[in-house]
Amino acid sequence: MTALQQSVGKLVIIVDDDEDQRSEMLFSVEMLGFRGLAFATGEEMLGALLDEPPHVVLLDINLYARDGIRIAEMATHLNHKVRICLLSGSAERCREARDRQLGEVYEKPMSLELLRHIL
């Protein structure tokens, strides 16, 4: 079975308050053969997390309403098995997230090749 065949149907949740970033990530995820579901806020994502556990959550750290690190803590409280990848364009925020050990941490912008590797 190819990697594309294995990915078909797996849900990837994207959380980013920047509409352009969110749309670009959703396009890339779907191009790689995954089902994508995108949210502008972490609170929206938390509700969906219980409906259908995702393959992975791609979560921006610098969200407007509530910090992505706090959202990651809440998500792991709801589902301790959820795989979270925290994303930020700030090296300092990435270090902070790594120190909290809430999941994988990656700097943005993310290449398609890195996204493929993560998924």
Image (cartoon, helix red, strand yellow):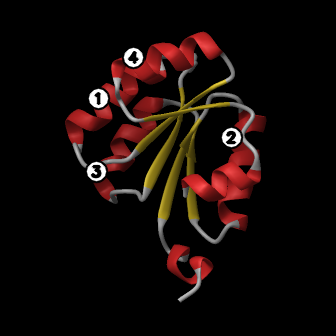
The disc, 1 or 4, on the residue closer to the chain's N-terminal end is: 1
The disc, 4 or 3, on the residue closer to the chain's N-terminal end is: 3
Q: Which of the two discs, 4 and 3, sits closer to the camera?
A: 4
**Is residue 1 found left or right of 74 in the rendered image?**
right
- Tag 3: amino acid: Leu
Q: Which of the two discs, 3 and 1, sits closer to the camera?
A: 1
Q: How far apart in space, not on screen, are marks 3 and 1 (Cα)? A: 12 Å
Q: How many marks?
A: 4
- Tag 1: amino acid: Met
Q: How far apart in space, not on screen, are marks 1 and 4 (Cα)? A: 17 Å
Tag 2 and tag 1, C-beta contact below 8 Å: no
**Is residue 63 found left or right of 32 in the rendered image?**
left
Residue at coordinates 67% horizontally, 64% vertically from top-left?
30
Q: State which quadrant residue 87 falls in.
A: top right
Q: How far apart in space, not on screen, are marks 2 and 1 (Cα)? A: 21 Å
Mark 4 sits on what residue? 99
Q: How far apart in space, not on screen, are marks 4 and 3 (Cα)? A: 27 Å
Q: Quadrant of the C terminus?
A: bottom right
Mark 3 sits on what residue? 50
Q: State which quadrant residue 33 falls in.
A: bottom right
Instruction: Tell me residue 49's x, y (percent).
Output: 34, 48
Label of residue 74 in the image: 1
Label 4's element?
Answer: helix
